[in-house]
Structure formats: C-alpha cells, structure tokens
C-alpha cells in the first residue's frame, strides 16, 4: 500500500488538473487535501516524501498521536480538521490544526473564537452546511447559512474562508455542490470545500476550491 501511495497521489493530481481544464478553470487553483485519517506514519510518509503538504484528519486525538512527529520531519505541513469537533476539544484543535472545515454550529464557533484569542492563533475556517438536510449529518441548514456567516465572521471575528459540505451518499452530488456555491457567493465567500474520492471532478466543475481525497491516494481503509 505505502509504495503505491505516491503514484496514486500523482494520478489524483493529474485528474484534478484535467478537471480544472475541462471546467475552463486555471490549473492549480484547486487544493488537494490528502485525507490521512486512520492511516499511520508509514502510510503517510511516501506522500510527504513526494512533496505534498496539505493533509486532512477527522479526529483531534488521532491527529495528536501522529502529526507532531511527522511535522518535525517534514516542515511546511498544513493540517486540516475535516471531521466533527466537540467543544471540549476546541483547545487541542486550535493548537494542532491550521484550517478547520467543520464549524457546524454556534457553540463550536464560539469555543473556537475563544480559544484562538487565548492561544493567539488565527485559523482559517469553513462553515459546514447540511446541504441535504439529513438528520444524521452535522452542519447548518441551507436556510440558516446567512445568519451563521454573520455570527461567525462579523460577530465572532473568525477568518471564514468558505463553506463545506458532504452531499447525500445515494443521490447525484452536483445539485448539492451547486447549492453550496450559490450560498457561498451570496455571502461573499470564495472557498468551497467539497468533493471526495468518488466525485471530486464533479465538485471541481461546480467550483470547488478544496477537495478532500483519501482512499484514492492511500487505498481502502480497513473495516473495523
């Protein structure tokens, strides 16, 4: 698995550039976040050695266990939290991560704002939108996005770069990507964190600026 990771990374990067061209977008405008959740240092090292520096993790505690040592060996890593965040982990998240994609409710926004002030760190954040309004998923409802942006950006002073979504798994993703783009544009936001291994080309066609790709780079995760 590890020996092939660098080759798969190159394949994904080529696919991203191809999708950019097909969408009539400038090459290099989409950032690839290599989702390394559940994978250990031996799996991640080949991707780091290939020069990639943007990685995504789902859990604060898991990231704490592997990234300080990896960062010491590979300067310049930008670490993205793409999974759910509990308020009691806000301090750890602010200390470890550079970008948080999963600001999904006011309580978390307030906890992060307080921790950033305390630690004097200003992280970039994306607000998570539950585009399919699925009860089991995190994120604000599309109808609440405008108000949430105002609270996070204007009232709490967070560095809101854009919106993030995970479309319903059993439906075509493009309409949901289009909805996220519409919501972002309406609020003056340019960042769109959307698209994963199975649908990042469609996300790029709809304006994605950040795609979160794991299995297409690292291989399938072991089932628990």
Image: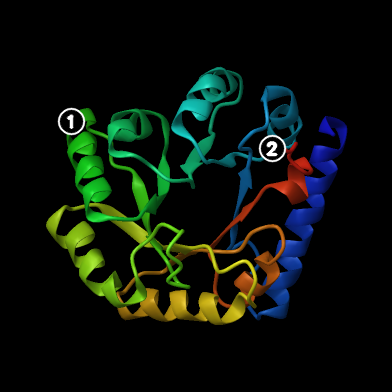
Instruction: Tell me where residue 49 sits by quadrant.
Output: top right
Residue drawn at x 53%, y 63% as measured from the top left: 166
Marks 2 and 1: CB-CB under 8 Å? no
Q: Label 1: which residue?
A: 118
Residue drawn at x 72%, y 79% as measured from the top left: 22
Classify the position of the C terminus by image quarter.
top right
Disc 2, SS: loop
Across and down, in percent, residue 19 comes to: 71, 71
Instruction: Tell me where residue 42 sits by quadrant.
Output: top right
Residue furthest left in the image: 155
* Nearer to us: label 2 or label 1: 1
Q: CA distance from mark 2 to mark 1?
A: 33 Å
Find residue 51 and name its label: 2
Label 2 crowding class (10 Å Cα cut-off): few <14, some 14-19, many 20+? Answer: few
Disc 1, SS: helix
For marks 2 and 1 on the same chain, the one whose residue lies earlier in the sequence? 2
Residue 59 sits above or below residue 150 on the image: above
Q: Is residue 218 left or right of residue 187?
A: right
Q: Is residue 103 left or right of residue 120?
A: right
Classify the position of the N terminus by image quarter.
top right
Residue drawn at x 57%, y 69% as measured from the top left: 168
Of 54 and 217, the residue lying toward us: 217
State the count of labels.
2
Across and down, in percent, residue 110 comes to: 19, 47
Across and down, in percent, residue 147 comes to: 21, 70
Instruction: Tell me where residue 37 sits by quadrant.
Output: top right
Q: Is residue 58 left or right of residue 110?
A: right
């Amino acid at each position: 698995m590890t020996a092939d990771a660098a080759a798969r990374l190159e394949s994904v990067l080529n696919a991203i550039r191809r999708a950019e061209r097909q969408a009539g977008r400038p090459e290099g405008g989409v950032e690839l976040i290599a989702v390394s959740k559940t994978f250990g240092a031996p799996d991640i090292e080949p991707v780091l050695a290939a020069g990639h520096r943007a990685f995504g993790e789902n859990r604060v505690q898991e990231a704490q266990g592997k990234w300080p040592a990896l960062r010491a060996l590979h300067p310049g890593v930008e670490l993205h939290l793409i999974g759910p965040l509990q308020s009691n982990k806000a301090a750890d998240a602010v200390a470890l991560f550079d970008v948080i994609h999963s600001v999904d409710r006011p309580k978390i926004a307030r906890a992060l704002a307080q921790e950033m002030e305390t630690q004097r760190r200003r992280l970039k954040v994306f607000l998570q939108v539950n585009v399919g309004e699925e009860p089991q998923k995190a994120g604000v409802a599309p109808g609440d996005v405008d108000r949430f942006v105002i609270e996070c950006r204007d009232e709490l002073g967070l560095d809101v770069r854009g919106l993030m979504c995970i479309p319903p798994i059993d439906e075509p993703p493009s309409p949901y990507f289009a909805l996220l783009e519409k919501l972002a544009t309406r609020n003056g936001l340019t960042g769109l964190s959307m698209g994963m291994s199975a649908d990042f080309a469609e996300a790029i066609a709809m304006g994605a600026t950040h795609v979160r790709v794991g299995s297409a780079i690292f291989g399938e995760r072991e089932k628990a």
